[in-house]
Image (cartoon, rainbow, N blue to C red):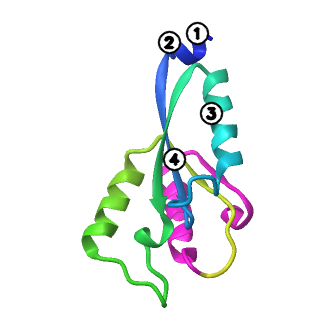
Amino acid sequence: ADSVDDPDSECTIAMVGKYCDQGDAYLSVVKALTHSAIATKQRLRIEWIVASDLAAGDDEEVSEQTSKEAWEKLSKCDGIVVPGGFGTRGFEGKIAAIKYARESGTPFLGICLGMQ
């Protein structure tokens, strides 16, 4: 109970996906992160980032301001999770987030497509 009520620190994780507007789309991933945070006595904060906001694919459009805001959110996170997703929508943004994690040394967890 102390881990939940009085955490030692806060950890912000970017969830870079394509179903960020659907509350339960990544529920199992959120629950796993929550339990990990409790076990390490941290308060979890998730930054939901729509993958296509980072880099639009051929059939996608994103404003420069939206993209800038998404990159600012990503850069302030302690770790990045790219959960599973199928199809081409959001693919370029997921790859951009993965590249950012690799080049910046930000801890990264890729699930399904995110492992690439």
**Residue drawn at (60%, 28%), measured in percent from left and top?**
37
The amino acid pointed to by label 4 is Thr
**Mark 4 or 3, nearer chain start:** 3
**According to the image, label 2 marks what residue?**
6
**Residue drawn at (66%, 80%), measured in percent from left and top?**
87
**What secondary structure is marked by label 4?**
loop
Q: CA distance from mark 1 to mark 2?
A: 5 Å
Q: Is residue 90 magenta?
A: yes
**According to the image, label 1 marks what residue?**
2
> Where does the N terminus fall, quadrant-wise?
top right
Q: CA distance from mark 1 to mark 4?
A: 28 Å
Q: Residue furthest left?
A: 65
**According to the image, label 3 marks what residue?**
34
**According to the image, label 4 marks what residue?**
106
* Residue 108 relative to residue 11: left or right: right
The amino acid pointed to by label 3 is Thr
**What secondary structure is marked by label 1?**
helix
The amino acid pointed to by label 2 is Asp
**Residue drawn at (57%, 18%), measured in percent from left and top?**
4
Task: Report the span colored magenta.
Answer: 89-116
Front-most of 78 and 88? 88
Q: Is residue 115 magenta?
A: yes
**Front position among marks 2 and 4:** 2
Q: CA distance from mark 2 to mark 3?
A: 15 Å
**Front position among marks 4 and 3:** 3
Q: Residues within 10 Å of mark 4 (few under 14, many from 20)?
A: some
Mainly helix, strand or loop, the magenta region?
helix
The amino acid pointed to by label 1 is Asp
